[in-house]
């Protein structure tokens, strides 16, 4: 008579070579953080100083620093990849939650667009090679190599929980993260100065106090002596406009890479209960599967209408016909409708969760912790802009239609961010489908079963295969599968999938508008007249990049919510 083995408690197997080195785990993290902070402050100082005429920091200095950082990062990544290939025990565990396929896919997409931007930059600087420094042509070439190497590195190693050379790995990952943040800051500063120069050209320099900003952010050094290099050929102007329109993809690539690198940094030396981590991530995802199609269709309609509104806004604002107010009314009206629907849909999703029986997932998950922190932190940028707009509209003297639309837009922006964050954060903490608490079964394991999982039925002890186990018995295997796969909460999951896809599409169009140049903050003169251009430009240029990042990060989180619903 054979005895069935009783499963014991889960034990975490010891990690190879991780004993004494993990005694100073917080110290190793502290060392890497201090390195990152010092390098980031140096980069921030040079990048911000290079944006002003009266500061003796040229754009060649910024390019030299960024090029050096990217070269060092590439060398470290190659060392990491070579080390993990030669040492199979270096990565004993892999975190299944880190680096999901949709995040890595977005990284590849933005990386390809960044490579196209580097081609445009190289062509732009090559148009007047005789009066440019060589570092300006070398920088986009090195950045292209950096993007290719880093994208491959994150694609194959994003889930690693490495257990060798822990302090060196932490410092390397933090330095790589700092390099991406420095590239992000440089792109944001260049785009902000470009927008300020466009506003100055359209309204004249008399009403603006940003005269210290360089006319062209890429030629800060030219303001010191002599005329700037001319860009009067058609091909040069195409290259110049092309890479400015591709800046949003470069910005998102740097931020996506930074989030994945932070999770890798948190996973250095981490011990998991199994070599493949924990949790359940569906291996196959089918878009629009098990949805009511109402959410995707309504979101698609708003996406198309939003594109049309954005094109009309850009044409009318940049035109000479003085139709700016009409463009602003159209822009604000669409945003008010979109934000209102998103607020109601997010609120309905939170209400549906009140009837959801899935248990909350309390496992330690660095990816989810970072997602929540980024959602809350990035929303602060749009909160700040909205509250400044509310004060300007309420306290200011003009009381017209445009002011009312601006006020409604600011209030709905705050409400939409709040309710969407509540919905996404609660969704990320819900267990996967099938995590509902089980009802207590009768003492006899084979009695009282109405519907059963046919595959799991054979694992029940002392259950003879009698036909009374499944009642009423289905006519065929297809009906049996339908009975098993149709729980009572199926309608809730379909509603949640619809809500996730609707919010995803709306966030995409709300990312496209500001990322590609829509600036109603300056076209609408209420805030400019109330705060003055200098203060208002500083507020928008600091806070708006966080608002743009929030939209794209919300898209990534909503895609995960859709998959796990």
Image (cartoon, grey):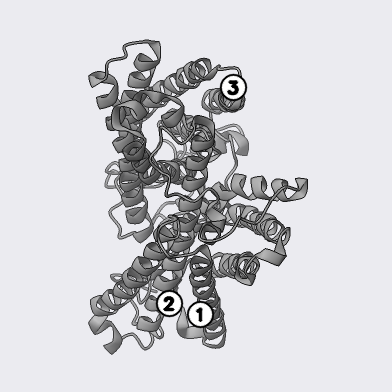
225 sits left or right of 349 in the view: right
**Residue 36 appears in which quarter of the rendering?**
bottom left
Q: Earlier in the sequence, mark 2 or mark 1?
A: 1
Front tag of 3 and 2: 3
Residue that badge 3 annotates: 316
Q: Is residue 550 visible?
A: yes
Mark 3, Cα crowd under 10 Å, few <14 / some 14-19 / many 20+, is some
Give the quarter of the figure containing the C terminus: top left
Which element carries disc 1, helix, strand or loop? helix
Towards the viewer: 368 or 521: 521
Q: CA distance from mark 1 to mark 3?
A: 49 Å
Q: Is residue 277 visible?
A: no
Q: Residue at x 29, y 78 (%)?
A: 31
Q: Earlier in the sequence, mark 3 or mark 2?
A: 2
Residue that badge 2 annotates: 172
Where residue 194 appears, as percent x and y from the top left, is: 52, 45
Where residue 115 appears, as percent x and y from the top left, is: 65, 58
Towards the viewer: 398 or 72: 398
**For the residues bearing labels 3 and 2, Cβ distance under 8 angstroms:** no
Q: CA distance from mark 2 to mark 1?
A: 7 Å
Residue that badge 1 annotates: 76
**For the residues bearing labels 2 and 1, Cβ distance under 8 angstroms:** yes
Q: Residue at x 36, y 46 (%)?
A: 542
Q: Is residue 147 above or below residue 12?
A: above
**For the residues bearing labels 1 and 3, Cβ distance under 8 angstroms:** no
Which element carries disc 3, helix, strand or loop? helix
């Amino acid at each position: 008579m054979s005895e069935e083995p009783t499963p014991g408690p889960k034990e975490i197997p010891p990690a190879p070579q991780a004993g004494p080195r993990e005694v100073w785990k917080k110290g190793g993290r502290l060392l890497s953080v201090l390195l990152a902070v010092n390098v980031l402050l140096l980069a921030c100082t040079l990048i911000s100083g290079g944006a002003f005429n009266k500061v003796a920091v040229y754009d060649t200095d910024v390019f030299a620093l960024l090029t050096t950082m990217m070269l060092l990062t590439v060398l470290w990544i190659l060392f990491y990849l070579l080390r993990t290939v030669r040492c199979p025990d270096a990565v004993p565990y892999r975190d299944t939650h880190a680096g999901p396929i949709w995040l890595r896919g977005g990284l590849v997409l933005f990386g390809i667009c960044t490579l196209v931007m580097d081609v445009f930059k190289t062509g732009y600087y090559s148009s007047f090679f005789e009066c440019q420094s060589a570092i300006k042509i070398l920088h986009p070439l090195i950045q292209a190599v950096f993007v290719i190497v880093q994208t491959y590195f994150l694609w194959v190693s994003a889930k690693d929980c490495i257990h060798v050379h822990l302090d060196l790995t932490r410092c390397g990952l933090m330095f790589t993260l700092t390099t991406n943040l420095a590239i992000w800051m440089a792109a944001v500063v260049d785009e902000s100065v470009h927008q300020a120069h466009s506003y100055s050209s359209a309204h004249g320099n008399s009403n603006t106090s940003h005269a210290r900003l360089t006319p062209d952010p890429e030629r800060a050094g030219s303001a010191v002596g002599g005329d700037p290099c001319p860009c009067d050929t058609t091909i040069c102007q195409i290259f110049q406009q092309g890479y400015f329109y591709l800046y949003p993809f470069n910005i998102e690539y740097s931020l996506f890479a930074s989030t994945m690198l932070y999770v890798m940094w948190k996973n250095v030396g981490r011990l998991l209960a199994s070599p493949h981590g924990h949790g359940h991530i569906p291996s196959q995802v089918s878009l629009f599967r098990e949805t009511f199609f109402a959410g995707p269709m309504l979101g698609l309609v708003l996406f198309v209408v939003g594109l049309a509104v954005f094109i009309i806004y850009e044409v009318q604002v940049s035109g000479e016909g003085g139709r700016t107010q009409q463009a602003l009314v159209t822009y604000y009206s669409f945003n008010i409708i979109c934000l209102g629907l998103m607020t109601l849909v997010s609120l309905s999703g939170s209400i549906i969760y009140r009837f959801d029986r899935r248990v909350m997932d309390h496992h330690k998950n660095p990816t989810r912790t970072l997602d929540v922190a980024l959602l809350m932190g990035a929303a602060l940028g749009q909160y700040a802009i909205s509250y400044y707009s509310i004060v300007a509209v309420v306290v200011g003297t003009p009381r017209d239609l445009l002011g009312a639309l601006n006020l409604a837009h600011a209030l709905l922006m705050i409400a939409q961010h709040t309710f969407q964050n509540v919905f996404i954060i609660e969704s990320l903490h819900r267990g996967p489908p099938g995590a509902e608490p089980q009802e207590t079964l009768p003492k006899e394991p084979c009695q009282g079963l109405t519907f059963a999982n046919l595959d799991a039925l054979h694992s029940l002890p002392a259950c003879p295969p009698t036909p009374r186990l499944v009642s009423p018995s289905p006519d065929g295997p297809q009906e049996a599968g339908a009975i098993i796969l149709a729980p009572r909460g199926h309608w809730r999951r379909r509603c949640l999938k619809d809500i996730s896809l609707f919010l995803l599409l709306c966030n995409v169009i709300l990312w496209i508008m500001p990322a590609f140049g829509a600036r109603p903050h300056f076209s609408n003169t209420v805030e400019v007249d109330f705060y003055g251009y200098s203060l208002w430009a500083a507020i928008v240029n600091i806070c708006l990049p966080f608002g743009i990042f929030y939209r794209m990060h919300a898209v990534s989180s909503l895609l995960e919510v859709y998959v796990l619903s």
